[in-house]
Image (cartoon, grey):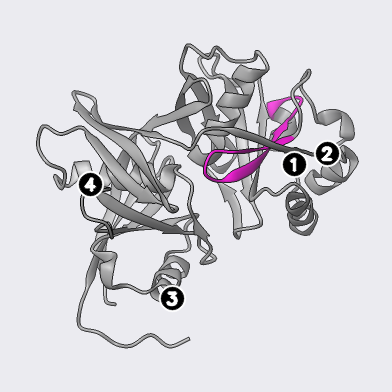
Amino acid sequence: MSIAKTTKTHPYHIVDVFASSVLGGNPLAVVMDADDLSTTVMQAISREFNLSETTFLMRPETAGGADWKLRSFTGAGVEVGGTGHNALGAWWLLGHLGLLPAGQREFTQEIGGRDLPVEVLKGKDGITVTMDQAPAEARAVLSDLDALALGLGVSRDDIGIGNVPVQTVYTGTAHLLVPMRSRSVIANVEPDVRRLRDILATVGAEGIYLFSLDPKDSSMTAHARFFNPTAGIVEDPATGSAAGPLAWQLAKYGYADANAPVRIIQGVEMDRPSVIRIDLDGDFIRLSGGGVLAASGELFV
C-alpha cells in the first residue's frame, strides 16, 4: 500500500484512559482534524501507533445531529464501533483541550453508525466523561466449555460462577463474558489464539472477557481480563465495551446491585490497573471515567 506524500500535518495525543497517573490505564491515540483522511490511511496510522485502539475525530456528516464523529481502529487496522475507552478518551481530550463550548455538558457523538449521548463534566477532581452504550442484548450461550478450557489453558472446573452463563452480550460490540472461579485462575490463563478465535466465531463475539468475583480491593465488583484475537488485540488493560455488558449481566443474575455503581478492575496483570465505573438503568448502560494526557505530537500525513 502506498500513501501519497503531503505537507499537511495532523495533531495527535496519547491519553491514558481510566488512569489517575501517566502510564496507567489504557493508552489511546487520538488523531485530530481527521476529516480528510481515508479509511486506508486511518488503518495505516492505527498500525503505526499499534495500540489497542486509535480514534479519529471528525465533524459529523449531518448538520444538526451529532457534535463530533468518531472512528476507531485497532492496531491491526480493524474498525470497531463500540463505545468504550476509544470514545471516552476522545471526549476527555476534547474537554481537556478546551474544544467544547463553555458551560455545555451534554453532547452527541456519531460512532458505529449511531448517535449516542455523552456528558462531559468538569469538576474539582478533573474531567469525567459519561456515555451511553447501546441497550444490552443477551445473545448466544456457549455450551462447549471443554473447548473453552482448552483455549484458555485452564481446567473445566475453573470456569463458572453459580448460574451465570458463558454468554455473548451486545451493547454496540458483542463480547463473550466468561465467569471464572478466581482471580488467581484468571492471572494464569494461557490463551490459545487460534482456538479462541474459532470459539468466538461460533457465538458471534469479537472479544472474550474473563471475570471473577473476588477482586483484591473489596470496593470493586469484579476482576477482569480481556483478549480479542478477532481484532488483533493480544490483551487490553481496560475495555469499556466489555465492562458495560458484564455489569448488566451481573445485575441480571443477582451478583451486582442495579441501583449502585458497578466497578470493575482490569489491567492488573499488565501492570496498568484500570477502574471502570458502570451505572445501570434496566437494559441501559452508562460508562464513566477520565484520563491523563501522556503525549502529544504531529503526524506528517
Q: Is residue 293 above or below residue 57?
A: above
Q: Residue beneath label 4, please?
A: 94
Location of residue 256 (image quadrant): top right
Q: CA distance from mark 1 to mark 2?
A: 6 Å
Q: Residue beneath label 1, please?
A: 189
Q: Amino acid at mark 4?
A: Leu
Q: Amino acid at mark 3?
A: Thr
Where residue 188 appears, as percent x and y from the top left, is 73, 38
Q: Residue at x 67, y 48 (%)?
A: 205
Where residue 78 appears, as percent x and y from the top left, is 53, 63
Q: Residue beneath label 2, please?
A: 154
Q: Is residue 228 magenta?
A: no
Q: How many residues crowd mark 4 within 10 Å: few (<14), some (14–19), many (20+)?
A: some
Q: Amino acid at mark 1?
A: Val
* Boundaries of the magenta span: 167-183
- Closer to the N terminus: mark 1 or mark 4? 4
Q: How many residues crowd mark 1 within 10 Å: few (<14), some (14–19), many (20+)?
A: some
Q: CA distance from mark 1 to mark 3?
A: 35 Å
- Closer to the N terminus: mark 2 or mark 3? 3
Q: CA distance from mark 2 to mark 3?
A: 39 Å
Q: Residue at x 21, y 55 (%)?
A: 63
Q: Which mark is residue 40?
A: 3
Label 2: which secondary element: loop
Quadrant in the picture for the C terminus = bottom left
